[in-house]
Image (tube, grey):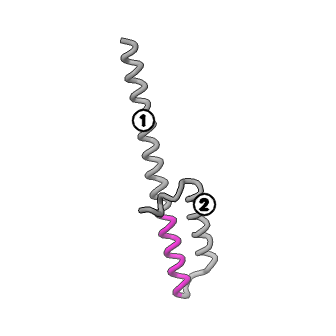
């Protein structure tokens, strides 16, 4: 009986770990998408003469930092 409960506990723990990983990935994906939107808005404003090139550079650096941390999955969506 104890062996069964141990296996069930291990399986539940694996499920929790996998669920947390998927949640973390989804949150990173969403954050990356938001950063890309900000970069696009900054670039658009700069091209129309209402934006600051520094804002575009900061947005680009934020995207690059996100990619360095989480990978380039946000670029494939």
Residue at 43% across / 46% down in the picture?
Answer: 22
Spatial CA span between label 1 and label 2: 28 Å
Residue at 49% across / 75% down in the picture?
Answer: 41
N-term mark: 1 or 2: 1
Q: Where is residue 24 in the image (x, y as percent from the top left)?
A: 47, 47
Residue at 56% across / 59% down in the picture?
Answer: 67
Counting other residues with Cα less than 10 Å from the Cα at mark 2, is it few (<14), some (14-19), or many (20 or more)? few
Q: Which mark is residue 52?
A: none
Say left or right for 26 vs 72. Answer: left
Secondary structure, mark 1, is helix
Q: In which quarter of the image is the C terminus?
A: bottom left
Q: Position of residue 50 (x, y in %)?
A: 55, 85
Q: Position of residue 62 (x, y in %)?
A: 59, 64
Q: In which quarter of the image is the N terminus?
A: top left
With respect to residue 42, does 62 lie above or below? above
**Quadrant position of residue 20:** top left
The residue segment tinted magenta is: 34-48
With respect to residue 20, does 55 lie above or below? below
Residue at 43% across / 25% down in the picture?
Answer: 10
Q: Which residue lies furthest to the top in this view?
A: 1
Say left or right for 11 vs 44. Answer: left
Q: Read off the residue under disc 2.
A: 65
Counting other residues with Cα less than 10 Å from the Cα at mark 1, is it few (<14), some (14-19), or many (20 or more)? few
Q: Read off the residue under disc 1.
A: 16
Q: Position of residue 16 (x, y in %)?
A: 42, 35
Secondary structure, mark 2, is helix
| Magenta stretch secondary structure, dominant | helix
């Amino acid at each position: 009986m104890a062996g069964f409960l141990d296996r069930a506990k291990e399986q539940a723990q694996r499920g929790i770990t996998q669920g947390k990983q998927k949640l973390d990935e989804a949150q990173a994906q969403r954050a990356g998408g938001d950063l890309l939107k900000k970069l696009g808005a900054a670039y658009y404003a700069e091209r129309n003469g209402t934006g600051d090139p520094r804002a575009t550079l900061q947005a680009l650096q934020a995207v690059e930092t996100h990619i360095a941390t989480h990978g380039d999955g946000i670029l494939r969506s």
